[in-house]
Image: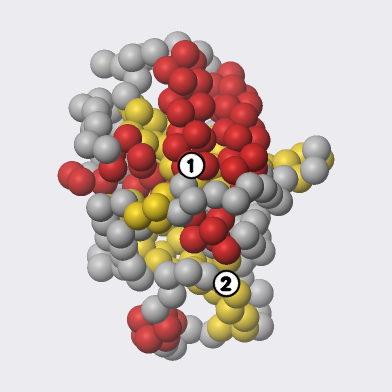
Amino acid sequence: MTQLPLSPLDILHAIEQIARQAGAAILEVYGSDFEVRGKEDASPVTAADERGEAIILAGLRNLTPGIPIVAEEEVAAGRVPEIDRVFWLVDPLDGTKEFISRNGEFTVNIALIVDGRPALGVVFAPALDRMFVGSEGNGAYVDEHGKRRPITCRRPPEEGLTVVASRSHGDAAALETFLAGRSVAHTRSAGSSLKLCLVASGEADVYPRLGRTMEWDIAAGHAVLAAAGGRIETVADHTPLRYGKPGFDNPHFAAWGEDA
């Protein structure tokens, strides 16, 4: 059985720094005339993905030696570790399409999974200087431009839900079907795992994802959301989303705020 070498809070503070280091390297590429390449699944990849992941892998291996790390570019290269009840999920650059379009809505995602649940996670948007952090039993907070404040999900207002949808992967017909019969006041678009963080911070009430995602895409945001009082459940049977699934694919899901 894998034992954590540090307390969850000590680990959390350490991965905040790792995420910032990766974010700095990503911003160096962001400010350059970078090349966009295609992976085998036709998704785009840049030097920023690779540099960010290298920094995170080195940092996590030093911090928690022996705990497996499932990272997007490592998996794409065929390097998939055997996982135990405790493992890391890493997406060094979530929202590569947002990175390429230079709208700033891309994130560094690092999450620790324990017994199928995201126990703690950090979502860092380096271009926006906005970091979301959450862990079981310790709540969630956002650090913006050096100022830190706690965040919690909100109860949906009487006027109706604020729905957040993917900027780059939307399915308007599927979203309309999902929302049928619900009172919706506003719909907004956002990139990367920032959508989960908007629900966690009370800026939105629900994020339905009705398309393909991988576990590393959402685990860190899920950790922040859960720590803020929200939840993610599958669309098909309304059960809690779990991690460590074969192939690391997610079913369609919905992320909800408090009592939404």
Q: Please rate how many residues cluster around mark 1, counting C-alpha atoms within 10 Å: few if below 14, some from 14 to 19, many from 20.
A: some
Name the disc covering residue 47, or none: 1
2 vs 1, front mark? 1
Quadrant of the image occupied by residue 189: bottom right
Q: Where does residue 145 sit, x and y in percent of width and height? A: 80, 43
- 103, 202: nearer the viewer: 103
Quarter in which the N terminus is drawn:
top left
Q: Measuring 32% from the left and 35% from the top, which residue is drawn there?
A: 74
Earlier in the chain: of badge 2 and badge 1, it is 1
Q: Where does residue 9 sit, x and y in percent of width and height? A: 58, 23
Q: Measuring 28% from the left and 42% from the top, which residue is drawn there?
A: 76
Disc 2: which residue: 189
Q: Residue furthest left?
A: 246
In this orientation, does residue 111 appear? Answer: no
Position of 29 compared to 236: left or right?
Answer: right
Indicate the colouring scheme: secondary structure
- 211, 74: nearer the viewer: 74
Rendered view: 213 above or below 107: below
| Amino acid type shown at disc 1 | Ala
Secondary structure beneath dot 1 equals helix
Quadrant of the image occupied by residue 28: top right
Total marks shown come to 2
In this orientation, does residue 157 appear? Answer: yes
Secondary structure beneath dot 2 equals strand
Quadrant of the image occupied by residue 91: top left
| Amino acid type shown at disc 2 | Ser
- 33, 219: nearer the viewer: 33
Q: Where does residue 50 sit, x and y in percent of width and height? A: 45, 37
Q: Where does residue 92 sit, x and y in percent of width and height? A: 48, 40
Q: CA distance from mark 2 to mark 1?
A: 26 Å
Rendered view: 32 above or below 13: below
